[in-house]
Amino acid sequence: MAKKERISTLFKQLETLVDTLDGDVEIEEAVALYEQGSKLLKDIEKKLDAARDKITVLSADDITEEQDGE
């Protein structure tokens, strides 16, 4: 993923690939589309993992601040 893309854009691209695969495509095109979809899925997973990690850190910071305030 060369440029940063919004996760919604990645999901739309993945949905488009799946819709194409659901149609009548040659095996070579299906394999290429599957490969593109796999890459998109990995990019989506990376973004979700990064978001989850950030939320975990922020939540831990909030808990620490609450405990320090007591």
Image (cartoon, helix red, strand yellow):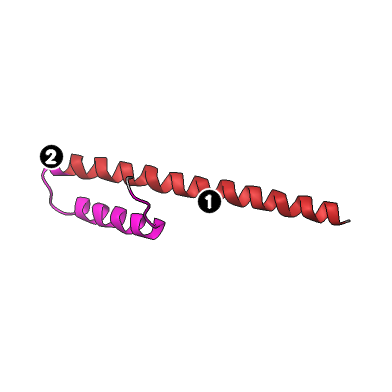
The magenta-colored residue range is: 3-29
**Residue 46 forms part of the magenta stretch:** no
- Specify the label residue 10 is tagged with: none
Location of mark 2 (residue)? 28
Mark nearest the camera among 2 and 1 is: 1
Name the residue rendered at 76%, 52% in the picture: 63
**Residue 23 forms part of the magenta stretch:** yes
Task: Tell which circle, 2 or 1, labels the residue nearer the N-terminal end.
Answer: 2
Left or right of 46, for residue 60: right
- How far apart in space, not on screen, are marks 2 and 1 (Cα)? 35 Å
Magenta span: chief secondary structure: helix
Q: Secondary structure at mark 2?
A: helix
Q: Position of residue 3 (x, y in %)?
A: 34, 50
Left or right of 49, for residue 61: right
Is 15 drawn above or below residue 35 in the view shown? below
Q: Position of residue 41 (x, y in %)?
A: 36, 45
Residue at the farthest front position: 3
Q: Secondary structure at mark 1?
A: helix
Say which amino acid is labelled 1. Ala
Location of mark 1 (residue)? 51
Name the residue rendered at 78%, 54% in the picture: 65
Q: Position of residue 67 (x, y in %)?
A: 83, 52
Name the residue rendered at 14%, 44% in the picture: 29
Circle 2 crowding by C-alpha within 10 Å: few under 14, some 14–19, many from 20: few
Residue at the farthest right position: 70
Q: Position of residue 36 (x, y in %)?
A: 26, 44
